[in-house]
């Protein structure tokens, strides 16, 4: 008998990789589709699974549509990956970010509680909740100090997940994922912005790449590895919260150098620092400690940063040559 899973944010980077993982495990995969963009299905298409997932119209801000999605899918596992996920935009749209990322998560939890409280729930938490870091390496016990409306909204969702687990007995887990990238990353995110620009410069389509704080440090992994940790959390007897990270931190500058070097170029020739890209409150360093995920889930990242960035540059070169 196949299991049923419902994924919010199925058209995003993580939703696409998670869908492929679950389909390969024999799941029936349903996805909540908020019809806001033009071509929202390109990631599913790129992975060759667009025709294998079942899409249900719905929205995180509409509890009734979430209840219907759970009734239609009969999901035993619910993955809440839907969000306004770009930190920079959250300063321009703080109320929307709060409604989608914060209240939206509570709506999904409520729908699970009402329709099928035995379903297992995963919340996509984020390292941005740590913000102004309170420990050199962040784990599940590190205090939170978010530095953006996005981090604040995600922290609301995170604590709501803990609350529903403790108050209503839901099998509700949170993955506190550090930065995870892939060729399916949106072009507004710095890694994809860099790899797309590097490919464009190499092909003679642009001359420079404008960036903000290139000395910010991040713990970057491959999204395809990280979705496996999400699935493993919902296979545990007890629900819990886990940091998912590589345990290594790299500057934006060093990440850029990897990308430029892959095509025989240098950062110094093409990168321009633009004050317009600095954020009102910067998160300078994020570095995760995934020891708990490694010990309890048996999970570890498989893809190095060099492998990840070169994979992304190659994918952007292919796209731009078409």
Image (spheres, helix red, strand yellow):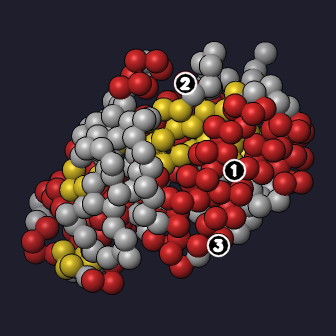
Residue 309, x across and y down, in percent:
28, 50
114 is higher (above) or lower (below) than 187:
above
Query: Which mark is on residue 95?
Result: 3
In the picture provided, is 295 more to the left or to the right than 92? left
Residue 310, x across and y down, in percent:
26, 49
Disc 3/disc 2 C-alpha distance (Å): 33 Å
- For residue 226, what is the image quadrant? top left
4 is higher (above) or lower (below) than 52:
above
- For residue 23, what is the image quadrant? top right
Disc 2/disc 1 C-alpha distance (Å): 20 Å
Q: Secondary structure at mark 3?
A: helix
142 is higher (above) or lower (below) than 118:
below
Query: Which mark is on residue 157?
Result: none
- The answer to whether marks 3 and 2 mark residues whose Cβ atoms lie closer than 8 Å is no
Disc 1/disc 3 C-alpha distance (Å): 15 Å
Q: Earlier in the sequence, mark 3 or mark 2?
A: 3
* Circle 2 or circle 1, nearest the eye: 1
- The answer to whether marks 2 and 1 mark residues whose Cβ atoms lie closer than 8 Å is no
Q: Where's the C terminus, which quadrant? A: bottom left
- Report the residue at 57% width, 28% height from top: 240
Residue 193, x across and y down, in percent:
35, 66
In the picture provided, is 75 more to the left or to the right than 202? right
Regarding residue 70, the answer to whether it shows in the image is yes
- Report the residue at 79% width, 15% height from top: 1
Query: Which mark is on residue 105?
Result: 1
- Report the residue at 26% width, 82% height from top: 274
Mark 3: give few (<14), some (14-19) or many (20+) Cα within 10 Å: some
Q: Secondary structure at mark 1?
A: helix
Q: What residue is disc 2 on?
A: 232
Q: Secondary structure at mark 2?
A: helix
């Amino acid at each position: 008998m196949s299991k049923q899973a419902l994924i919010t944010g199925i058209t995003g980077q993580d939703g696409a990789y998670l869908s492929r993982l679950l389909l390969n495990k024999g799941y029936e995969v349903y996805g909540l589709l908020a019809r806001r963009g033009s071509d929202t299905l390109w990631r599913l298409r790129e992975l060759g699974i667009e025709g294998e997932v079942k899409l249900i119209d719905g929205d995180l801000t509409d509890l009734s549509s979430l209840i219907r999605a759970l009734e239609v899918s009969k999901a035993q596992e619910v993955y809440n990956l839907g969000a306004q996920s770009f930190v920079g935009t959250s300063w321009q749209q703080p109320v929307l970010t709060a409604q989608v990322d914060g209240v939206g998560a509570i709506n999904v939890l409520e729908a699970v509680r009402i329709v099928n409280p035995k379903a297992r729930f995963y919340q996509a938490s984020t390292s941005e909740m740590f913000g102004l870091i309170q420990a050199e390496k962040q784990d599940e016990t590190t205090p939170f100090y978010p530095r953006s409306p996005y981090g604040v909204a995600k922290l609301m969702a995170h604590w709501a997940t803990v609350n529903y687990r403790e108050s209503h007995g839901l099998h509700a887990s949170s993955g506190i994922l550090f930065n995870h990238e892939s060729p399916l990353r949106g072009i507004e995110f710095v890694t994809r912005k860099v790899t797309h620009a590097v490919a464009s410069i190499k092909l003679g389509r642009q001359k420079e790449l404008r960036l903000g704080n290139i000395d910010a440090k991040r713990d970057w992994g491959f999204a395809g590895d990280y979705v496996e940790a999400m699935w493993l959390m919902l296979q545990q007897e007890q629900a819990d919260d886990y940091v998912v990270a590589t345990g290594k931190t790299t500057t934006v500058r060093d990440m850029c150098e990897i990308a430029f070097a892959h095509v025989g170029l240098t950062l110094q020739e093409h990168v321009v620092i633009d004050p317009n890209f600095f954020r009102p409150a910067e998160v300078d360093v994020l570095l995760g400690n995934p020891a708990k995920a490694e010990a309890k889930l048996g999970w570890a990242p498989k893809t190095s940063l060099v492998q990840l960035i070169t994979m992304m540059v190659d994918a952007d070169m292919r796209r731009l040559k078409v």
